[in-house]
Image (spheres, rainbow, N blue to C red):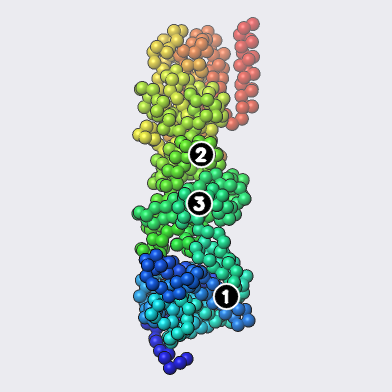
Amino acid sequence: MSQKTEKHEFQAEIQQLLDIVIHSLYTDKEIFIRELISNASDACEKLRFHQTSGKSIHEPDVELKISIATDDNANTITITDTGIGMTRDELVENLGTIAHSGSKAFLKQIAEGKEKPNANLIGQFGVGFYSAFMVAEEVKVHTRSCDADKPGHTWISKGAGTYEIEETPDCPRGTRIFIKLKEDDKDFAQKTRVESIIKQYSNFVTFPIELNGEVVNKVSAIWTRSKSEVKEEEYKEFYHYIGHDHEDPLTRLHFSADAPLAIQSLVYVPAKNMENLGISRSESEVHLYCRKVLIQSKAEGLFPEWLRFLKGVVDSEDLPLNISRETMQDSALMQKLNKVLTTRFLKHLDELSRKDSESFYKIYDQYHKFLKEGVATDFTHRDNLAKLLRFESSTQDKDARTSLKDYIERMPEGQNEIYFLLASGRDAAEQSPYLEVFKAKKYEVLFLYDPIDEVVMDHLGQFEEKSLTSAEKADLKIEDEDKKTEQLSDEDAEALAKWAKDKLGDKVESVRISTRLVNSPAVVLDSDKTMTAGMRRMMKSMNQDLGPVKVDMELNPRHAIVSQLHAMKSSNEILATKVAEQLYDNARLAAGMVEDPKTMVNQLNQLLEQVLTASK
Ligand code: ADP
Ligand code: MG
């Protein structure tokens, strides 16, 4: 070096940092390329800003770009930008002192033993430049500020204690970082290796990145552009690329916000729910960027678990810069992002359901299970999720589905709760004895066909302050005017109930007179008020031992079978007992409590025999 060479010592903290970088980091070393490209991109961005502010700059016509050159004979890699460059003082300040809060936080974290040193931390804490020393035997920085009056400089260091600076007059504007690779790390002098690293981390950097003279980043970061500027085709193309999916997505949300956090995000819903195909649990494929540079691929915690089917990107410059990088680790910040993003996405689905119900239902059909999982597990978003639920209902056409909100709007005066009925399908629901009282009162009942739906309703509890109640548990009465004339007197009915309980014995917990039945002679209800037949079936399928089912039976005093049974119990008690047992079995069958209907055949045959004998 010439006589103008100055020797400097690294600040103690920087040396400490360098020691960690050089001696303790063995994995993910490739991120040094991401970090240097990120710095180069920042430098270009700063220059562009300078240009727009009208200041005079050195070499104003030089194109803003990043060039990378590899040399696998000399084992070197060089990263050059035409950005803002550094003056001598800036070199000392930026590459020799701990002026950056990020570096301080990084050291503190490691000193406190909170984190084992690892390369990923480097990016998060903004010690980016020093990451070059993970792979470098020596780093040489040639830089010239855009300030026309300032000369260029060269900065050299091996990372051990000192660095040297000398003036380099014929330096072009910008910064060139020349790395002589360590023997063990010479694969970073391989073009193909470097190319795949650039594609992985830096594909969306706005400035062209040339590798050995060829531009390698071809996909633009469309999420940072305004919606009106992005063409439909570009959205699709970007999805195909980032989602590794050849099908078009079902919907997308391109959204940006300044407060409470600066967010630019573009997320898509894939056409197919992979979990439906039984492959495996989906893993979120939303990647976290900071100003177009990948910070974390498949970032955990950006969205709740139940939105794990989303694919796309979230870019937030707040994370590493304004709030300082260490807070990126801070889960409170991640939770804040998560909440904003999730709320916005649910709003998008809600809007879609009104503006384009066909698209909404395509999404719903693929992903309703995830939304229901959300209702059951995520209190924060429960109410917004509930708005998206859709069910068939007793008053709507088959296949037409209703929202809870629309259901409430149709509720007649006097109805205060939302009712639902779990059944195996539409026909079963319509023929269910539990539905009769609702038909008589002209109350709508939602039809649920999946036991999960009942669990969802249970978790939800209420919607817009209306309780969600199982039709099996509803406390409703058919009013006097609905009653038929030939009904049993209250006294006779009570006597019949008592007699039936006596005959059925332990099979039933109790027998009472029903106020809810119209066309069915009898119904059974789980005596456990918190349990419906569907829940019981589901728990059983999960091998949960619930003990024997205890049921209450209700008899319909308005039904011909019941009134005749009353008469028969005095005239032919044996046959009457058989009929009562059969009524009980039929009711259990209707309630879906009979696991093997074949067991009923014997009983039925006995009954037929009695009937034939009696009528001889
Ligand atoms: P950060 O990028 O988070 O600030 P780095 O350690 O990556 O931290 O870089 C430290 C500083 O060095 C940067 O803030 C910047 O001022 C300066 N710097 C690094 N690389 C360049 C470059 N290519 N051009 C201009 N300045 C640079
Ligand atoms: Mg940096």
Of residues 401 and 166, the one drawn nearer to the viewer in this rendering: 166
Write down the residue under mark 2: 360
Residue 289 badge:
none
Write down the residue under mark 1: 69
Residue 441: percent from the left, percent from the top? Answer: 42, 19
Q: Estimate the spatial distance between the alpha carbons at disc 3 and disc 2, rounded to whole Å.
A: 23 Å
Q: Estimate the spatial distance between the alpha carbons at disc 2 and disc 1, rounded to whole Å.
A: 49 Å
Disc 3 residue crowd, few under 14, some 14–19, many 20+, Cα 10 Å: few
Residue 362: percent from the left, percent from the top? Answer: 55, 39
**Residue at (53%, 59%) from the top-left corner?**
220
Say which element carries label 1.
strand
Write down the residue under mark 3: 230
Residues at marks 2 and 1 touching, judged by CB atoms closer than 8 Å = no
* Rendering quarter of residue 46: bottom left
Label 1 is placed on what type of residue?
A: Ala
**Residue at (39%, 22%) from the top-left corner?**
412
Q: Estimate the spatial distance between the alpha carbons at disc 3 and disc 1, rounded to whole Å.
A: 32 Å
Q: Is residue 454 above or below residue 276?
A: above
The reply to whether residue 80 is visible in this rendering is yes
**Residue at (35%, 22%) from the top-left corner?**
414
* Rendering quarter of residue 30: bottom right
N-term-proximal mark, 3 vs 1: 1
Queried on whether the Cβ of the residue with tag 3 lies below 8 angstroms from ligand 2, the answer reads no
Q: Is residue 344 above or below residue 473?
A: below
N-term-proximal mark, 2 vs 1: 1
Queried on whether the Cβ of the residue with tag 1 lies below 8 angstroms from ligand 1, the answer reads no
